[in-house]
DNA sequence: GGGCTTATCGCAACTCTTCGCAATAGAGGG
DNA sequence: CCCTCTATTGCGAAGAGTTGCGATAAGCCC
């Protein structure tokens, strides 16, 4: 079933605004912010309110089409749920970002699950620290 | 040397406001937010502006007296740098928080350092996931 | 203690995000 | 195609945090 049909089957609705948010996420190469998405949509459809974009990102996340991560500190970064999962290393000094294969994080996830019954999503937040250059 | 002297030695100044922020952090049992600190100070000294509290937390972090972590999503949590370091598990469903010994995170830190030359601070952000109860 | 330098402050303005509410418009059924 | 129900929207307002700027006061030297 297509996305629209799936959304309707769950009692939600497929609106113009929701479709525009999905489109913006498809166009975006990497993780984007709600503010970037809002700005790109309003460039062509200025009547669409930022709050609608924020609400749609949350709705689409509940529906399973979208996920978010946190790279540097506060900002929430969004991406399609079907994108390749991966971890991030972010340098607190120079701000450089680096993607890492998800399986490096697996052993810790397994241990947290064994010792604390906790199912960790280690890709949700970037790992903060000092990159090779900055650590000197 | 005491904190005030150390701060002056670094060319910074020990102001009433800075001392009040340090005091608030000493009174706080756990991680607190800038907003909580600001509110507790303004209860007695309403003339002290919130922006001053934010700026002082950053300054004190640069000076090495204060650190911050990120528990749930947006909020930055502050604590004294000399407090016992530890990791956090936060459930994305029920919001429960759990502290974990820092050494559970060590193996991953060691691996990131070996394979990527990255000195990870794994206590900086909480690990997000599903707690035992919510995972079912 | 008085004077000088400038780190720091209070304030106002601004950005990003959230929220309540009345109006709008998807969806499904007839 | 029309009707009904209610999910969703746009708007206004508010909260949390940041930033530029002129005023204040900490620290240092005499
Ligand atoms: Mn941080
Ligand atoms: Mn999150
Ligand atoms: Zn770096
Ligand atoms: Zn839970």
Image (cartoon, coloured by chain):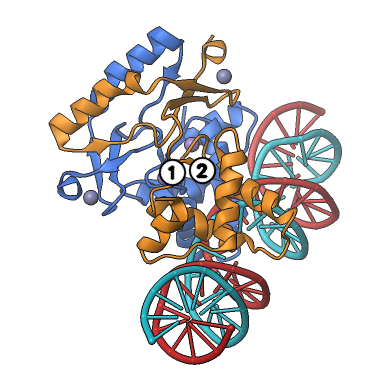
Chain colours: A blue, B orange, C red, D cyan
Residues tagged 2 and 1 counted as in contact (Cβ below 8 A): yes
Q: Is residue A19 above or below residue B85?
A: below
Residue at image point 64% right, 64% down: B49
Residue at image point 31% right, 48% down: A92
What is the x, y in percent for residue D5?
81, 33
Q: Chain under label 2?
A: B
Residue at image point 15% right, 37% down: B117
Label 2: which secondary element: strand
The label number, if any, that marks residue B67 in the structure image:
1
Label 1: which secondary element: strand
Counting residues from the start of the chain, the first of labels 2 and 1 encountered is 1
Report which residue position mark 2 lands on: B78
Quadrant in the picture for residue A59? top right
What is the x, y in percent for residue A114?
39, 7
Look at the image and tell me in which quarter the C terminus of chain B lies: top right
The label number, if any, that marks residue A17 in the structure image:
none
Quadrant in the picture for residue B125? top left
Residue at image point 50% right, 19% down: B130
Relative to the observer, which residue lies in front, A27 or A95?
A95
Disc 2: CA contacts within 10 A as few (<14), some (14-19) or many (>=20): many
Res. A53 in view = no
What is the x, y in percent for residue B83?
46, 34
Q: Is residue A125 left or right of residue B38?
A: left
The Cα atoms of the two marked residues, 2 and 1, are separated by 6 Å
Relative to the observer, which residue lies in front, A59 or B11?
B11
What is the x, y in percent for residue B95?
59, 26
Quadrant in the picture for residue A10? top right
């Amino acid at each position: 079933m297509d996305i629209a049909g799936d959304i309707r089957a769950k009692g939600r609705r497929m609106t113009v605004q929701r479709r525009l948010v999905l489109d913006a996420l498809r166009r975006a190469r990497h993780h984007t912010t709600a503010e970037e998405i809002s700005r790109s949509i309003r460039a062509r459809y200025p009547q669409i309110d930022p709050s609608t974009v924020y609400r749609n990102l949350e709705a689409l996340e509940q529906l399973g089409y979208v996920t978010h991560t946190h790279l540097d500190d506060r900002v929430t970064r969004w991406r399609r749920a079907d994108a390749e999962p991966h971890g991030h290393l972010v340098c607190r000094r120079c701000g450089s970002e680096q993607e890492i294969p998800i399986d490096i994080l697996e052993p810790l996830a397994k241990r947290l699950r064994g010792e604390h019954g906790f199912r960790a999503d280690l890709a949700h937040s970037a790992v903060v620290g000092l990159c090779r250059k900055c650590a000197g």
